[in-house]
Image (cartoon, rainbow, N blue to C red):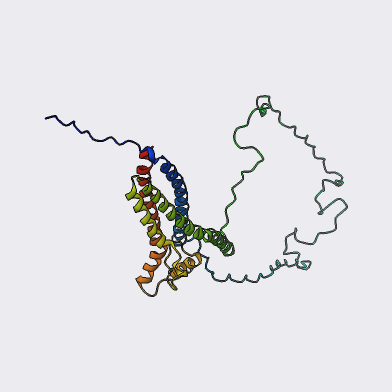
Amino acid sequence: MALEPRRDQPVRLPNPSAQPFVVALKTARFYAVVLFWVTMVCVLAHVTTFILAEWVALYDLPQAGPAAPEPAEVKPATEPAKEPAPADTSGFGIFENSALAAPAKSAPGELFPGVPFEGGAKKPGTPAEPTKPPKEPAKTTPAEMPKEPPSGAATEGKVVGQPEVRPKEVEPLTPAERRQKVMHYRNVTADILRPARIVGVLASFLLAVTVFLYLQIALLGRLSGIRQLTNALFLLLVFLVTILPWESIFEGFRASSLLDFAELLEAHAAHARGWSDGRWPMAQYFGRYLVMPIASAALLAWSGIQFAAGYAESVLANE
């Protein structure tokens, strides 16, 4: 009895007939990656907007403060009291000091009687006072003279004659300036989110169509990775449910991860004033504007991971 040859484990070789399908899958994968990142940026922009509004308070308008008090009336400065004029002491010269008494008539060149005036003529018989010679300036030796710094030498310390310049203090913004700044932030955010909402919906829809075509090409070429690609497609369909504007189809149903900025500001203002209906409105507020966008981003990321695994098995294994 002849022994049957030992069957070894079959070696997986590249499928030569799958090359046309691989080229088509690479092209579809390029557009899928571009649409994936465009959609992810649009979703994360809405999540960031909620964080800036709720915890950073970037869009809160300043409250009107109390009116400034009117300036008090400035009273004119009082004139200094005039000193009373000296009374006439001609009749009471006996009891007054001789310096305060009325000056007697003096000869020319005399300010007071009996007191000589240096600039005028002296009385005959009075000895002349010796004149003092003018004082000579003190002589300084060369060692005591101040030394000048040599030309071109750098001086240490601060420059003489240049006062130290203090930095200007930043003045706080006035309420009007703060309001204008907040309105600028609101306008810029609205200009970004308005097209991001439209682009996000269109890009997500095109991404789902691209993944569906990718799956059909892989099935037609009988390639592997079908399970991961199917998971990616159904995750994208659930993601579409979370971002489509259902309020345009169902009246009163507003549940979309790509939120309206004006509605967010109104809900945030109501939340800042305090809820009066209990915890349920607060749960709806955070669930709609925070939990739902984060869940959409998670679904999109998980779909991208599944798509990358399917691409590795359907394309990279046949190269």
Q: Residue at x 44, y 63 (%)?
A: 244
- Name which residue lies at 39% across and 59% down: 237
Image quadrant where residue 235 sits: bottom left
* Placement of the N terminus among the 4 image quadrants: top left
Instruction: Indicate the quadrant containing the C terminus: top left, top right, bottom left or bottom right.
Output: top left
Q: Position of residue 279 (x, y in %)?
A: 35, 70
Which residue occupies the foreground of this view, 180 or 200?
Answer: 200
Residue 182: % across, % down: 55, 62
- Considering every residue shown, the one lying at the far front of the view is 1
Quadrant position of residue 12 = top left
Q: Which residue is more in the foreground, 10 or 79?
A: 10
Where is residue 318, by image quadrant? top left
The residue at the far left in this view is 1
**Image check: 166 left or right of 304?**
right
Q: Is residue 257 above or below residue 149?
A: below
Rendered position, 75 above or below 221: below
Which residue is found at the position 67% from the left and 70% from the top? 75
The x and y percentages for residue 224 are: 33, 45
Q: Residue 68: horizontal and vertical position, in percent? A: 58, 70
Residue closest to the far bottom: 277
Please determine whether, in this image, residue 109 is positioned above or below residue 244: above
Front-lying residue, 316 or 43 = 316
Q: Is residue 290 left or right of residue 88?
A: left
Seen from the viewer's position, the closer of residues 41 and 127 is 41
Residue projecting furthest to the top: 142
- Number of labelled discs? 0
